[in-house]
Amino acid sequence: MLAREQALREHCAALAQCRRCPAMAAPVVIGNPVLSPILLIGQAPGDKEGGLGKPFAWTAGKTLFKWFERIGLDEDTFRQRVYMAAVCRCFPGKNPKGGDRVPSPVEIDNCAGWLQAEVDLLKPALILPVGKLAISQLMPVKKLDEVVGKLHPVTFHGHPSEALPLPHPSGASTWHRTEPGLALLDSALTILKNHPAWQLVARQAINLT
C-alpha cells in the first residue's frame, strides 16, 4: 500500500510538470493523490479550475457534488476518497464560437498516457466518466439517453472494470434538468449508491470521522 501511495504521489508530481500541449493553458489541474476503488474522469478543466487548483471547482462542480451529497458523500469527503482525473488536465481555451474549446485528438492522446498510468496504479472497480467526451473514451456514445442510468462492463487501458456514465453537470446543459435526463440521472445515482465500491468508500469515510 505504501509503495502504491508513493508511486501515485510521484505520478501526480510528474503530471504537474507536463507541457506536452502548447495550445493548452497551464497549470495542470490534478485531484488528490488518493488510492481509491473509484476513478472519476471529467472532460477538461474550465478557466477557473487552474487558479483554484482542483477539478470541478466552479459552477459545474457545485452541481456535481450536490448529486453525490444526495447519496451520502459531501464534496470534501468525495475529494478525499475518490481519485479525480480527466480526459485532458489543462484548460483548452475558449472556442471563438462560444464555450470552451474541445480538446483535439492529439491533445487527448497526449494525456491518455497519464490516465493509463492511473488505471494501472488504481485498478479501479468503478469508473465514473462525466460528460460525453469522457464517456466516449470507454464506450461508443451517440446519445446520453443510451448510456446514462446503466452500469456497463468495460475494459479500459487493459483493466477490466465497470463504468457508470454521468451527464456533464454544466449549467449550459439542460439534459440533466429535463426528462428523460432527470430520471436517468436518478437511476445512475441509485446504482452508484448501491455499488460495492461506493459503499466501501462511504464506510472508509465514516471510519475517518
Image (cartoon, rainbow, N blue to C red):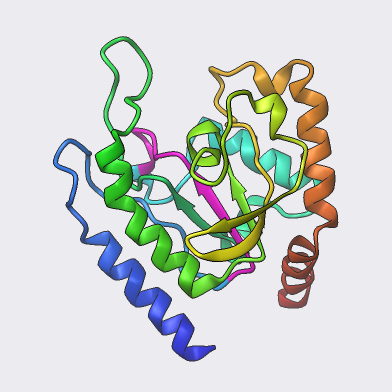
Q: Note whether 45 is above or below 200 in the view shown.
A: above
Residue 88, position as x, y percentages in the image? 36, 45
- Return the residue nearer the eye: 148 or 139: 139
Residue drawn at (55%, 40%), measured in percent from left and top? 135
- Return the residue nearer the eye: 90 or 152: 152
Residue drawn at (25%, 49%), measured in percent from left and top? 27
Q: Note whether 6 is above or below 120 in the view shown.
A: below
Residue 89, position as x, y percentages in the image? 35, 48
Quadrant where the N terminus is found in the figure: bottom right
Q: Note whether 191 is above or below 104 in the view shown.
A: below
Residue 167, position as x, y percentages in the image? 63, 32
Question: Which image quadrant is residue 38 in?
Answer: bottom right
Residue 37, position as x, y percentages in the image? 64, 68
Left or right position of 189 against 9? right
Q: Can residue 28 be seen in this view?
A: no
Residue 41: within the magenta? Answer: yes
Quadrant where the C terminus is found in the figure: bottom right
Residue 140: within the magenta? Answer: no
Magenta stretch in the rendered image: 36-49
Q: Is residue 109 visible?
A: yes
Residue drawn at (64%, 61%), measured in percent from left and top? 161
Residue drawn at (25%, 41%), measured in percent from left and top? 106
Question: Which image quadrant is residue 186 in?
Answer: top right
Farthest residue toward the bottom? 2
Farthest residue toward the left? 22
Query: Disc count in the image?
Result: 0
